Amino acid sequence: MKTPAKSSKRTRDPESKLASLHDAALQLFTERGYEHVSIANIAKEAGIAVGTVYRFYDNKLFLLRAMLEGIEAEFVARMKAEWAKGGEYAERLDKVCEGLFEVAQERSALLRLFTMTTDVVYEDGLFPGDRIQAQIEEMYREAMNAGAFRKGDVDMMAAMAHGLVEGAMMRWMRTGSPAHSKVSFDLASVMKSGFLT
């Protein structure tokens, strides 16, 4: 006769298993470092079979990639939502930066994954951070096309926009509450490693 514990593990739905897998990977990656964690370690921590991990991901790098894509999608969605609220472009940019910090604060452990390895390439050929940079460029082009800024080379102006976002985020770090200090440090570390530059 099967014990209830084994039975409950086997009857867990795929979404529950995937959530456990991601939680376990995040915990182990942040505690031990990406290079020092195996698929077997993650499976054991998640309470699932090693074979189940491979049903979701071909290898550890694909798992990390999926987790990075998830957090990046959250950042981009928040940026789009804040930008869509309208108003003066300077205010909109400030709101986008504030939104980025709020997501970073809510998901601070996931944020550290961006510094784990440089080997991640998404299925569409993009690298971590590329979608956020593309969103910044899109917002800046919209503002430029509306005449909010002096006309200039779009690529050069988009590069300047990255600097403006980074500068606004640094200002928000300095003026934020003490509760923001840890997430500010994590986000600054990510920016220093090239995530938003």
Image (cartoon, rainbow, N blue to C red):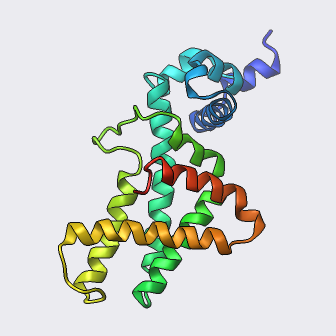
Residue 14 location, x and y as percent? 57, 33
Q: Which residue lies furthest to the left in this view?
A: 153
Q: In which quarter of the image is residue 80?
A: bottom left
Seen at 66% across and 37% down, the residue is 23
Q: Which of 192 and 142 is in front in this view?
A: 192
Q: Which of 23 and 6 is in front in this view?
A: 23
Determine if residue 60 is in view.
yes
Residue 150 location, x and y as percent? 24, 86
In the image, residue 81 sits, relative to residue 32, either above or below, namely below
Which quadrant is home to the N terminus?
top right
In the image, residue 92 sits, relative to residue 8, either above or below, namely below
Residue 127 location, x and y as percent? 35, 43
On the rendered structure, is 123 left or right of 5?
Answer: left
Seen at 60% across and 36% down, the residue is 22
Determine if residue 85 is in view.
no
Q: In which quarter of the image is residue 110?
A: top right
Residue 155 location, x and y as percent? 22, 66
Q: How many marks?
A: 0
